[in-house]
Amino acid sequence: MNPYAAEQVAGRRVVLDRLDRDGAALAALLRDRAADVWIADHAPDADLPEGCTLVHERAAAAQRADMLLVDCWTAETAAHVVQARERGIHVGCLADLVLHEWPTPVIGVTGTAGKTMTTRLIAHLLEAAGWDVLVPPTGRAENAWPSADTLADLIDGRAPDALVLELTSTHLAYMSASPPIAAVTSLSPDHAELHGGEGRYFATKQRILIHQRPGDTAVLPVDATALVPRQDVQVFRFDADEPLAQNSTVAPHHRGNVACAVTLVRDALGVEIEQEDIDAFRTPSWRGECIGQVGTVAVHHDGMAATPGKAAAFVRALPDQSAVLIMGGVAEAEAGQLHAAPGEQRLLREACVEFARAGRRIVLVGPAAAQVAPLLSQAGAKDVRIGPDLHWATAEALRDLHGVERIAWVPAFPVELQDRERFGELVAAAARTAGLEWAPTPAAAN
């Protein structure tokens, strides 16, 4: 049963917990289905759709709701979510509506790391083979989450050969549908604070599989034994450590993404793949690409590496004592302290061993510095410097480049979007101040 169908929502009070572009589009769709739509957001950043009601207190709104639809970053531990579930009302999200109603095959990709690149690589390979593929247009950080654009395409009756979507844990936590073709890129402890524990986080990843039907497809890592597909589902396994093709232009830390995408496209869908199609793929921004050079030293932007595992995946390929690493960021979010669960702490300690091995100098910024510095010291890091912000960090990174092969921003913690956007500008400014030559790559210059 589709809980969002007109006959299910007509006359019922549906509460949304955020008014942004996506929330406004979802509210308008439900209003057109005769729902009584309330949006509970104390700081909206979009206009209220006509016929909807804006309130500011989420808990009070949830008490009077017949259905609650949450934003893609709403924590399961949020008071209004806990309250709604205790009342037994349906708690869903925009992505769930899309999966219930999309008319053609949906390929959904989740995982602890590599969702965006794998999603876009799958779409790229299918398009190269002549498929009509729809991916949500570039959103923040080029992610491919279901969005207002996806709803617009649904309303307009778009019917491509496939819709390819990225689904994070805070989509899956609220979903009552699974994509008929589901892929999991990797599975390790993360985002425990959003779900109420590591076990709850792993359970959300399982949700991409639990509503699949006989004949559906699951593409899973060989080592993800915690993921249990349903009976009569076709299962294809890939090895994330499979070597890349000789002379491939793909960065080593993306080999797992390539293995997942190739297994889905070639093995699960039976589509022929050419190596040049893989090499022609443009990696989404801020995922380890070289954005330029300071003299002969390459500068890499891995600003989306907001977890220890993602940061370590890039650093693992670097020679010993060869790099200046810029790290740190936010240590606490609304849902609680970040990377604080036991499994996440273990991954952070292991990552710090890699950082200490590869880092000739490690520059730490933000509240997370206090959490990382002792672990780096225990791991044997010899030169660790702590400062206030990314502006300071870029200048400090360029202070002495003797023996340095590259500078890499690998935060290992969440950072502000504006910092990701301006990192190249900060490096350029620091180079000018230091009297060093800065040569951005053509893509970075644009």
Image (tube, rainbow, N blue to C red):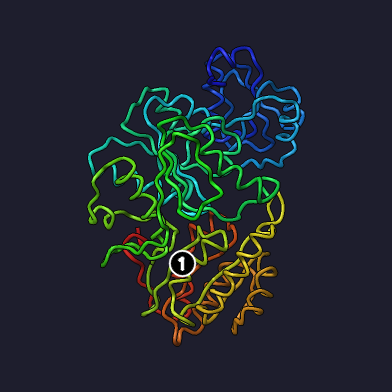
Is 134 left, or right, of 412 in this rendering?
Answer: left
Is 37 left, or right, of 102 in this rendering?
Answer: right
* Residue 136 visible in the snapshot: no
Residue 399's place in the image compared with 258, above or below, is below
Residue 228's place in the image compared with 395, above or below, is above
Quadrant in which the N terminus is drawn: top right
Quadrant in which the C terminus is drawn: bottom left
**Rendered image quadrant of residue 103:** top left
Give how far across and how far down residue 341 sits, in percent.
69, 57
Q: Residue furthest bottom?
A: 402
Q: Residue at x 66, y 26 (%)?
A: 54
Secondary structure beneath label 1: helix
**Rendered image quadrant of residue 307:** bottom right
* Residue 272 visible in the snapshot: yes
Total count of labels: 1
CA neighbours of label 1 inside 10 A, class few (<14), some (14 to 19), many (20+): many
Q: Residue furthest front?
A: 231
Q: Residue at x 23, y 42 (%)?
A: 129
**Rendered image quadrant of residue 387:** bottom right
Give how far across and how far down residue 128 sits, in percent.
24, 45
Q: Residue at x 60, y 37 (%)?
A: 71
Q: Residue at x 48, y 57 (%)?
A: 421
Residue 356's place in the image compared with 343, above or below, is below
Q: Tag 1: residue type?
A: Phe
| 181 vs 112, nearest the viewer | 181
Give how far across and how far down residue 13 sits, in percent.
66, 19
Q: Which residue is mark 1?
A: 314
Is 164 left, or right, of 90 in this rendering?
Answer: left
Give how far across and how far down residue 113 sits, in percent.
50, 54
| 126 vs 403, nearest the viewer | 126
